[in-house]
Image (cartoon, rainbow, N blue to C red):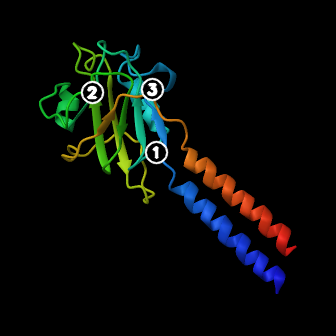
Amino acid sequence: MEKMLCMIVFGVLAVASMVQDATAQTVHRVGDNMGWIIPSNGAVAYTNWAAGKTFRVGDTLVFNFMTDRHDVLRVQKTSFDGCNSQNAIGSAIMTGPANVTLDTAGDHYYICTFGTHCQNGQKLAITVSSSTGTSPGANPPTSAAGGPSGSVPGGSAPPPPSSSTTVLTSFVLSLSAIALAIFL
């Protein structure tokens, strides 16, 4: 009976740990070490960067750029394709680095509005899935323009991995060890 109770407690703790990990938000540094610049190989640089990633509602994009040299503007697909700001969703973020929280599922398009930066490849298209869904996230979008909901900018440096995630994981592991010690 004690071994059965031990297995149940351990199983509940394991499931709780997995559920917590599945809902953790991800911080994506746009372009990784390259940052948000005019890429030397054009728009393919950001397409390739996004191709290996899954973006979900609640995740954060961090655009690392120098203030007064670049900006970030979310636009609809037609403006993304034409590199113009006519169909802007929200306002341009002028201060770098810029944090953008992905608050809606669907296609998201970002451009730099400085000079010919967008025409030279400083643009990013991603597909955002719902936080609980398993749909693919980073393939270049092919559908119509994104919805009217905007991004939430922030001017601070990217946050470190969530300390609540670390604390909860440590707590679950500690409880697991205690449960095993008590019931075995």
Disc number placed over residue 31 in the picture, else none? 3
Mark 2 residue type: Ile
User: Gap in Å between the C-alphas at discs 3 and 2?
Assistant: 17 Å
- Residues at marks 1 and 2 touching, judged by CB atoms closer than 8 Å: no
The answer to whether residue 78 is left or right of residue 176 is: left
Q: CA distance from mark 1 to mark 2?
A: 23 Å
Give the residue at the far right of this rendering.
Answer: 184
Answer with left or right where residue 53 lies relative to residue 143.
Answer: right
Between the C-alphas of marks 1 and 3, the distance is: 14 Å
Residue 48 coordinates in the image, percent (x, y): 45, 30
Residue 154 lies in what quarter of the image? top left
152, 102: nearer the viewer: 152
Q: Which residue is mark 2?
A: 93
| Residue at which label 1 appears | 54
Which residue corresponds to the image point at 83% horizontal and 80% vertical from the top-left? 3
- The mark found on residue 120 in the picture is none
130 or 81, nearer to the observer: 130
